Image (cartoon, helix red, strand yellow):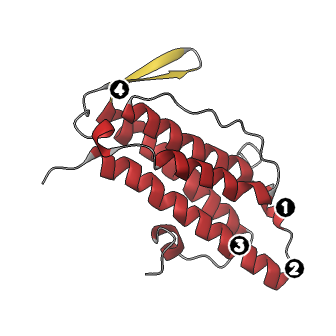
Amino acid sequence: MSLSLYDASILGYLRLLRSLEAILDKAEAHAAATGADLQAWADARLAPDMASLIGQVQMASDAAKSGAARLAGVPVPSFPDVEITWAELKPRIDRTIAFLETIRREDVDGHEDRTVELPIPGRTLTFTASGFLFQFSLPNFHFHVVTAYDLLRAQGVPLVKADFLSGGQAF
């Protein structure tokens, strides 16, 4: 059986976005139990030149929705980065999941050689769809989800690797 681009992309994005929501739920429960300030966690950074937890969630959302759209050959939806509070994080993830659920398998599978152009400051990167997914989109998406996880671990939230891997489901 060959690898399905849809399974590797859309289902992968969905799984980790659901993990991210479950990680945020676990952080909320821990904050309630310890009296911690959720907004301080939302504003936390691993290093001064890195984005905050809010920024990491926004960029994970952007990576998933733009990756999915480019792979499916549909317009990338615009989600302005307006979230400034903890309470706005899960709705951002929910909007991303809702968009991903509109992407059909047939829009992605069978189009591995579709040209994907990614404009970045000063130039445009050009990939095949499979190259885009494996060389750029998935590593970028994983980076931001892992960084969100790490930010909360650094704040003392009792997360374990299974929280990241579980897709929001109990193992």
Q: Does 40 appear above or below 25? A: above
Mark 4, Cα crowd under 10 Å, few <14 / some 14-19 / many 20+, is: some
Going from the N terminus, do you reach mark 3 or mark 1 first?
3
Question: Pointer 3 and pointer 2: residues touching (CB < 8 Å)?
Answer: no
Question: What is the quadrant of the C terminus in the image?
Answer: bottom left
Which residue is pictured at 71% across the width and 72% down the height? 27
Mark 3, Cα crowd under 10 Å, few <14 / some 14-19 / many 20+, is: many
Q: Please indicate whether residue 9 sits to the left or right of residue 166 in the image.
A: left
- The residue that mark 3 highlights is 27
Going from the N terminus, do you reach mark 2 or mark 4 first?
2
- The residue that mark 2 highlights is 35
Dot label at residue 114: none
Which residue is pictured at 46% across the width and 52% down the height? 13
Secondary structure under the numbered disc 2 in the rendered image = loop
- The residue that mark 1 highlights is 39
Q: Quadrant of residue 11?
A: bottom left
Going from the N terminus, do you reach mark 1 or mark 4 first?
1
Q: Where is residue 55 in the image (x, y as percent from the top left)?
A: 70, 46
Type of amino acid at the residue the image marks with label 4:
Phe
Query: How much space separates mark 3 and mark 4, taking CA atoms?
Result: 37 Å
- The residue that mark 4 highlights is 127
Which residue is pictured at 63% across the width and 32% down the height? 78
Q: Quadrant of residue 28?
A: bottom right
